[in-house]
Image: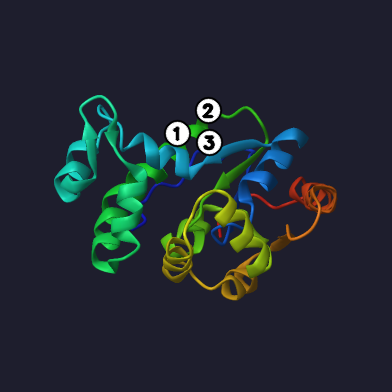
Amino acid sequence: MVQKLNPVRSEKTIVGLTGSFGSGKSTVAHFFSELGAYIVDADKLAHEALVPGSDIYREICEAFPEAGLDKKQGLDPRKIAKIVFSDSRRRKTLESVIHPYVFERIADEIGQAEEKVVIADVPLLFESGYDRFCDKTIVVKATEEVMRKRLCEKGFTREEIDSRWKAQLPLAEKIERADEVIDNSETFQKTRTRVEEVWKTLHSCPKGAK
């Protein structure tokens, strides 16, 4: 649920970065960071909300009491993920609470950034509607075989992988809606080369949200 949280823009180019679960957005974001972009990680901001003391912690606790650890550690992201990716109704409940919080935090980060190019790494970029605040959108893609292998190596089960993919737009649809596509199926060097190509286009990108 997108609120009117248009970030402070000035002369900055706001780039929305997304992809399917396991496509390697973090790797691509890292390469952009090395080239001089400021990275805002929506997942990290969302995890902030699961820690005691956040503005919406109590609200999430009430919605997901079974995901609690203890008063110091806060809520367990893995437990919440298991709940919401198996129940679309509860996923929508979480999104209605956490999306406005995350978008406001992204706006804060953009406002504080000194860099001229800001990469907003948002897994649900198109699904949430945050792409409307971006000057340009980038989708990171990889083959299903590569993505599944990466995720299995990180300890995700086949069921967890499939449930998360099912909750997102199909990769083909994301690619169709993106301004740029970065293939992260092969070597890091090939990915890095493609990132450098896209980087050159970002400096000539017209300002102003879509």
Image coords of residue 123 (percent x, y) = 50, 55
Left or right of residue 43, residue 139 in this image: right
Q: Amino acid at mark 1?
A: Asp
Q: Residue at 69% of width from left, 52% of height from top?
A: 206
Cβ atoms under marks 1 and 3 closer than 8 Å: yes
Residue situated in front as seen by the camera: 114 or 47: 47
Image coords of residue 155 (percent x, y) = 51, 50
Question: What is the quadrant of residue 176 in the picture?
Answer: bottom right
Q: Secondary structure at mark 3?
A: helix
Cβ atoms under marks 3 and 2 closer than 8 Å: yes
View extreme (top): residue: 72
Up the image or down, 102 lies above or below 165; here it is above
Cβ atoms under marks 2 and 1 closer than 8 Å: yes
The image quadrant where one finds the C terminus is bottom right
Q: Is residue 10 visible?
A: no
Callout 3 environment at 10 Å: few (<14), some (14 to 19), or many (20+)?
Answer: many
Q: Amino acid at mark 3?
A: Ile
Q: Amino acid at mark 2?
A: Gln
Q: Which residue is mark 1?
A: 108
Image coords of residue 11 (percent x, y) = 64, 38
Calculate the distance from the C-alpha at mark 3 to the C-alpha at mark 2: 5 Å
Left or right of residue 13, residue 72 in this image: left
Q: Residue at 47% of width from left, 56% of height from top?
A: 130
Left or right of residue 151, residue 13 in this image: right
Up the image or down, 92 lies above or below 76; here it is below
Q: Which residue is mark 2?
A: 112
